[in-house]
Image: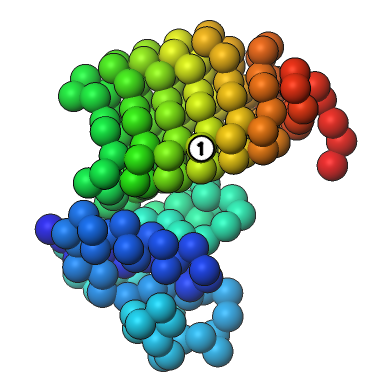
């Protein structure tokens, strides 16, 4: 497999490193672009390098930082980096599903038939995604979330731990579904919802 670089040096980078090694990737380095003091050190037993152009044409990266996944992907892409597809061997992705480059599929994840997962999206451990669903780019689906069939989750959206999105419901671009929410109706772009049933809230 191609040499893999991990964007980010925080706690979640340790988990992504384990996913990658379980999947047979060679993790070369963590990439830091916010804290120069970390560059040149070893974090999670992996060398840390500064963000710059990829060292060779075969280099690929996945994102392990928090915050805006789309922004990070754009910053790396502008320097010539290309995303890897990281799929943990403990996940089940239907043969008819598609997973774009840069996406991270964690252990215990299930992705149903004819479903599409966009670039640089992150499906954390135990997340369930039903059939004929579209997960946009740079989406965070957190541990234990359950997204039913025939849903659309817009670019940059966030689905919290243990949240349930019921069949045919759409979450708009950059919509936020809080942990444990039960979503019975569409979530507008940029809207934040929480509770059972889910209702809008202000941050």
In the depicted structure, whether residue 184 falls above or below residue 67? above
In the picture of the structure, the residue carrying the numbered disc 1 is: 144
Residue in the image at 45% along x and 35% along y? 127
In the depicted structure, whether residue 61 falls above or below residue 160? below
Residue 33 percent coordinates (x, y): 51, 73
**Is 75 in front, or is 150?**
150
**Is 180 in front, or is 12?**
180
The part of the image, by quadrant, that contains residue 20 is bottom left
Quadrant of the frame with the C terminus? top right
Residue 63 percent coordinates (x, y): 43, 57
Residue in the image at 36% along x and 46% along y? 106
Quadrant of the frame with the N terminus? bottom left
Residue in the image at 26% along x and 33% along y? 92
The part of the image, by quadrant, that contains residue 35 is bottom right
Residue, far left = 1
Give the number of callouts. 1
Residue 173 percent coordinates (x, y): 61, 29
- Local crowd size for mark 1, using a 10 Å CA cut-off: few (<14), some (14–19), many (≥20): many
Task: Report whether 153 appears left or right of 175.
Answer: left
Residue, far right = 202
Task: Report whether 64 appears left or right of 166.
Answer: left
Secondary structure of residue under mark 1: loop
Q: Is residue 7 visible?
A: no
**Is 142 in front, or is 139?**
142
Residue in the image at 47% along x and 52% along y? 74
In the depicted structure, whether residue 134 falls above or below residue 107? above
Q: Is residue 108 visible?
A: yes
Q: How is the image coloured?
A: rainbow
Residue 8 percent coordinates (x, y): 47, 68
**Is 193 in front, or is 195?**
195
């Amino acid at each position: 497999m191609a040499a893999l670089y991990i964007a980010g040096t925080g706690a979640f980078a340790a988990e992504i490193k384990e996913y990658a090694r379980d999947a047979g990737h060679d993790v070369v380095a963590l990439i830091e672009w916010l804290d120069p003091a970390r560059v040149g050190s070893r974090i999670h037993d992996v060398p840390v390098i500064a963000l710059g152009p990829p060292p060779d044409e075969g280099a690929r990266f996945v994102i392990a930082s928090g915050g805006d996944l789309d922004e990070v992907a754009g910053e790396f892409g502008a320097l010539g980096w290309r995303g890897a597809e990281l799929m943990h061997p403990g996940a089940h992705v239907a043969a008819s599903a598609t997973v774009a480059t840069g996406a991270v599929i964690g252990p215990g994840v299930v992705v149903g038939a004819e479903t599409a997962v966009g670039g640089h999206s992150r499906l954390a451990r135990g997340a369930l995604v039903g059939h004929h669903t579209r997960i946009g780019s740079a989406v965070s689906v957190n541990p234990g979330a359950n997204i039913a069939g025939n849903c659309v989750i817009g670019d940059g959206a966030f689905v919290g731990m243990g949240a349930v999105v019921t069949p045919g419901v759409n979450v708009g671009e950059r919509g936020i579904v809080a942990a444990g929410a039960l979503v019975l109706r569409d979530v507008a772009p940029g809207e934040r919802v929480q509770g059972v049933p889910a209702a809008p809230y202000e941050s």
